Image (cartoon, rainbow, N blue to C red):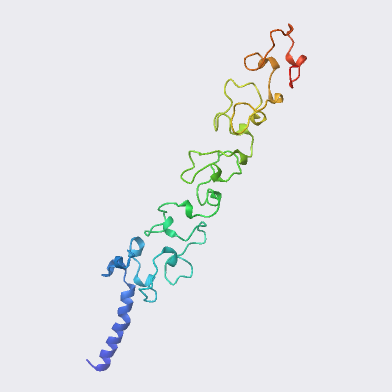
């Protein structure tokens, strides 16, 4: 073999060998990557060395997700997509090395913004169609562990009247022994509790006075009341009997 031909072959080996070294995946490499403190798992096993060590710099390689999986990185790692929810750059909070999708878990501590910015029935499940009409943020009543059960109920964001929910189906409604009234609960009750009744709005009562003022449900005629068959409102008003 001539000297010139030998030099050519040597030059070819010098060019091709590094390319093969940097191009092979961890599955075909004899190098124990766990000795670096960064064990290759999942999708990292099939990545070629050059995907992460783009300039052949092995000792300065970074080991956190956000050092590679960002726009402008000198690696081939996939960055956060533009439609990604607003969150920290700690990918491992939700993802694992096998792939970005599906999520391994959802760490709400790594998310910024209100629940509804994601729970809008597009990015993530949102209010169901039978949800009480409300302007509240989800966290006013729900936890990040699960929507059910509701751990607290904040009435301040409710946009409809009480009876729209307190109908005996969506939420507890009038008991069977409730006075005959309209369904405007808030005229007599507060949102803290049903009983005791804080006030009584007679304009919401249905029926005549004696249907309630019978001595059982409400104060009735005194024993020394004049004998009469007339209804209470013939002589009395709803402010007081006297």
Q: Position of residue 6 (x, y in %)?
A: 25, 90
Above or below for 65 versus 222: below
Above or below for 96 versus 200: below
Quadrant location of the C terminus in the rendered image: top right
Q: Position of residue 215 (x, y in %)?
A: 64, 13
- Residue 94 visible in the snapshot: no
Q: At 44% across and 59% down in the image, what residue appears?
A: 91
Q: Residue furthest left?
A: 1
Q: Position of residue 14 (x, y in %)?
A: 30, 83
Q: Position of residue 86 (x, y in %)?
A: 52, 57
Observer-nearest residue: 110 or 100? 110
Tell me how many marks there are.
0
Q: At 35% across and 67% down in the image, what residue appears?
A: 47
Above or below for 16 versus 72: below
Q: Within the image, what quadrant is residue 35 found in?
A: bottom left
Q: Within the image, what quadrant is residue 183 found in?
A: top right
Q: At 32% across and 78% down in the image, what residue appears?
A: 18
């Amino acid at each position: 073999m001539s000297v010139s031909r030998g030099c050519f072959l040597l030059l070819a080996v010098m060019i091709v060998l590094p390319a093969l070294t940097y191009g092979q995946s961890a599955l075909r490499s004899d190098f124990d990557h766990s000795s670096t403190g960064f064990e290759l798992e999942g999708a990292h096993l099939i990545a070629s060395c050059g995907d992460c060590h783009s300039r052949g710099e092995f000792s300065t390689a970074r080991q956190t997700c956000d050092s590679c999986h960002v726009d402008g990185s000198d690696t081939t790692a996939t960055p956060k997509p533009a439609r990604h929810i607003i969150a920290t750059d700690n990918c491992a909070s939700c993802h694992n090395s096998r792939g970005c999708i599906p999520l391994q878990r959802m760490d709400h501590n790594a998310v910024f913004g209100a629940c509804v910015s994601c729970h809008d029935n597009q990015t993530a499940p949102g209010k169901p169609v039978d949800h009480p009409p409300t302007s509240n943020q989800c966290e006013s009543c729900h936890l990040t562990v699960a929507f059910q059960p509701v751990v607290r109920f904040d009435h301040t964001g409710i946009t409809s009247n009480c009876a729209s929910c307190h109908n005996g189906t969506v939420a507890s409604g009038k008991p069977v022994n409730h006075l005959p009234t309209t369904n405007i609960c808030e005229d007599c009750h507060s949102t803290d509790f049903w009983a005791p009744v804080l006030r009584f709005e007679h304009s919401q009562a249905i029926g005549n006075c004696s249907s309630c003022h019978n001595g059982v449900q409400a104060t009735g005629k005194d024993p020394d009341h004049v004998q009469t068959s007339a209804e209470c409102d013939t002589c009395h008003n709803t402010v007081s009997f006297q």
